[in-house]
Amino acid sequence: MPVDPESSQPLLRVEEVVKSYGSRTVLHRLSFTVATGERLALTGPSGSGKSTLLNCLGGVDRPDSGRVILDGVEVQSLASDALARLRRRTLGTVFQFFHLLPTLTAAENVEMPLQLIGVKAEERASRVRQALDRLGLGPRADALPSQLSGGEQQRVAIARALIHRPRLILADEPTGNLDSANGGIILDLLRELTDETHTALILVTHSEEAAAICHRRIHLQDGRAVIRT
């Protein structure tokens, strides 16, 4: 379903964000909005500022100037404890290299965000089971990451990103470490699940196939938005 970013109050508003490292300015006064349920692709060559921007949006980095407003909250102004609470409840993340905890099973990795926000054990078990079944991983619930294929690990990572019902998912090259077949499966899942849950997605990618699942695209060049489609 098409999403009109101007149809309602944006979930995310980025206003004149600047970020530098030493004398090098990585982001130059970037501004854009993302609506609830919208999928936005961030494309551009290596070094164009995509991952730095994602880090600023998620509160991993703080912009030097400008504002990042997520669900009505100015992310860059939060103290560390409040920022951690916002990230645990409002954000989900998916990475190129999965970032699963190697000593935890698939189910335990997915369960962790629910533990961090204090969901009761019975509800945690139910939600984890439903999530793994939805992604075709029910029989792999007790497997360690080392026992899973790359595609299975990324599906676990997606389940973990969505399990706490975030408003926004930040995905950094989620298919970059997968072959084309598994990459296609992951893209289909991201599209289907964000449609079902009306969760917004910001997807950093070099892949045209990945960008194609998004409603809009911002192409970065040297930290500037040079193309918006």
Image (spheres, rainbow, N blue to C red):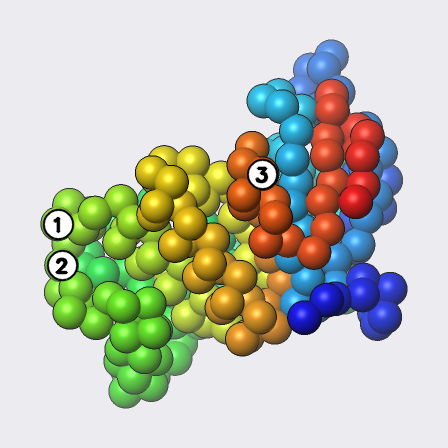
**Residue 38 location (% of width, % of height):** 68, 62
**Residue 139 location (% of width, % of height):** 15, 69
Looking at the rendered structure, the kind of residue marked 3 is: Glu
Looking at the rendered structure, the kind of residue marked 2 is: Ala
Q: Secondary structure at mark 3?
A: helix
**Residue 187 location (% of width, % of height):** 47, 53
Residue lying furthest top: 23
- Residue at 59 percent across and 53 percent down: it is 213
Residue 208 image label: 3
Q: Which residue is mark 1?
A: 147
Q: Which residue is mark 2?
A: 143
**Residue 204 location (% of width, % of height):** 58, 40
For label 1, the crowd category at 10 Å Cα-Cα, with few meaning under 14, some 14 to 19 and many 20 or more, is some
Looking at the rendered structure, the kind of residue marked 1 is: Gln
Mark 3 → mark 2, Cα distance in angstroms: 33 Å
Judge from the rendering whether residue 206 lies leftward or rightward of residue 153; answer left or right.
Answer: right
Q: Secondary structure at mark 1?
A: helix
Q: Is residue 70 visible?
A: no
Q: Is residue 14 above or below residue 224?
A: below
Question: Which mark's residue is nearer the viewer, 3 or 2?
Answer: 3
